[in-house]
Image: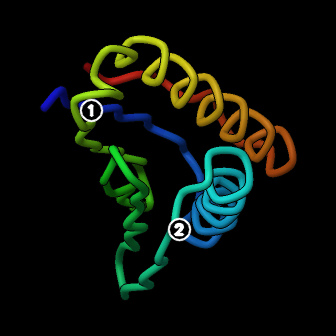
Amino acid sequence: MPDINIQREHGMSLAQARQAANKWTTQAEQKFGLSCVYTTGQDSDEVTFNRAGITGTLNITPDLFELSAKLGFLFGAFKEKIEDEISKNLDTLIAKMQAENGTHAATAKL
């Protein structure tokens, strides 16, 4: 199965990162039909998501968003497009939240 791994430093507080992650979760459910479960922890949170052909997690920490996903056979053919769309949506959401909160720009981590 093809894998998608995306990391973004966000420079927000955990509370602000949680707001962004909640918005991402809502978008993922509405736009992509993902079933998402948000689990809140003391120092970090996790969103697990799935639908036919894709499963994954979004980990939320005070410094970083880390998304990992496994694509099934049919979605594997579209890995690059899916990864680009997820990255674009996450980057746009982070930039919007940072603008609202006056924090620095996100940086990609390879």
Quadrant that contains the C terminus: top left
Q: For the residues marked 1 and 2, what is the alpha-carbon distance in whole angstroms?
A: 21 Å
Q: Residue at x 62, y 72 (%)?
A: 15
Q: Position of residue 56 (x, y in %)?
A: 31, 53
Q: Residue at x 57, y 23 (%)?
A: 85
In this rendering, the answer to whether 79 lies above or below 69 is above
| 53 lies left or right of 20 | left
| Residue that mark 1 sits on | 5
Q: Position of residue 106 (x, y in %)?
A: 55, 29
In this rendering, the answer to whether 34 lies above or below 68 is below
Disc 1 crowd, CA 10 A, few/some/many (<14, 14-19, 20+): some
Of residues 105 and 18, the one nearer the viewer is: 18
Q: Residue at x 39, y 59 (%)?
A: 50
Q: Earlier in the sequence, mark 1 or mark 2?
A: 1
Q: Residue furthest right?
A: 100
In this rendering, the answer to whether 52 lies above or below 89 is below
Q: Secondary structure under badge 1?
A: strand
Q: Residue at x 64, y 53 (%)?
A: 24
| 93 lies left or right of 67 | right
Q: Which quadrant would residue 39 be assigned to in this image? A: bottom left
Q: Secondary structure under badge 2?
A: helix
Q: Position of residue 22 (x, y in %)?
A: 65, 66
Q: Are marks 1 and 2 in contact (CB under 8 Å)?
A: no
| Residue that mark 2 sits on | 14
Q: Which quadrant would residue 23 be assigned to in this image? A: bottom right
Which amino acid does the dot numbered 2 rest on?
A: Leu
